[in-house]
Image: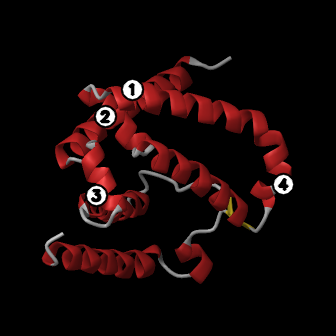
Amino acid sequence: MANAQETGTKGSTLIAGFIFGIIFGFLLQKGGVTKYDVIIGQLLLTDFTVLKIMLTAVITGMIGIYAMKGFGWVRLQPKPGSFGTNVAGGLIFGVGFAVLGYCPGTIAGAVGNGYLDGLFGGITGIVLGAGLFAAAYPRLQKGILSKGDWGDVTLPRLLKVNDWIVVVPVAVVLYLILRLIESSGH
């Protein structure tokens, strides 16, 4: 049985997650990436709004997480990965994205905007997809998901260097890509 302190910590974590989720959805909506036309424009390489927002989020998140780690506020606990899990996840994500034109985050934003395709197609797809994956998981776990296992490694750990030796150059390269996209008028 959980003690009061553990229950309080779990409750505050859920509340913080809920608040950050609402902020995330609001920012997605304000950025325009909950609109079907913007997402299709990204897939057709005519509108790079989604890519610009994602690059900005990756840069901000990477610097923020490693700064919090440096201050001792968080401990990174990366999940183990493999070639198989990335292939399976990419296929599931790609099929859902291609069929509906939304990713899970933008589905939530579309539902918040009142878009019925996000509500019915998106939420139904998420629930059905999760259910099918859960049902197939025992077989997949022994099959494709175990192929090419590389463990819980991060680039700094793999290279045996200080985190910032990787974070700073990656952030700079991503920023330069972002600036290049922006200057091209897309």
Residue 78 appears anywhere in the view: no
Q: Position of residue 14 (x, y in %)?
A: 44, 28
Residue 2, image quadrant: top right
Cα gap from disc 3 to disc 1, whole angstroms: 21 Å
Residue type (three-letter) at the residue carrying disc 1: Leu
Mark 4 belongs to which amino acid? Answer: Gly
The label on residue 147 is none
SS category of the residue bearing label 1: helix
Q: Are marks 2 and 1 in contact (CB under 8 Å)?
A: yes
Q: Secondary structure at mark 3?
A: helix
Q: Which residue is mark 2?
A: 110
Q: Earlier in the sequence, mark 2 or mark 3?
A: 3
Q: Earlier in the sequence, mark 2 or mark 1?
A: 2
Q: Where does label 3 land, which residue?
A: 41
Work out whether residue 160 or residue 56 is closer to the camera in this orientation and state it.
56
User: In the image, 76: left or right of 17?
Assistant: right
Q: Nearer the viewer, residue 155 or 117?
A: 117
Helix, strand or loop at disc 2?
helix
Q: At 26% from the left edge and 44% from the top edge, which residue is drawn?
A: 28
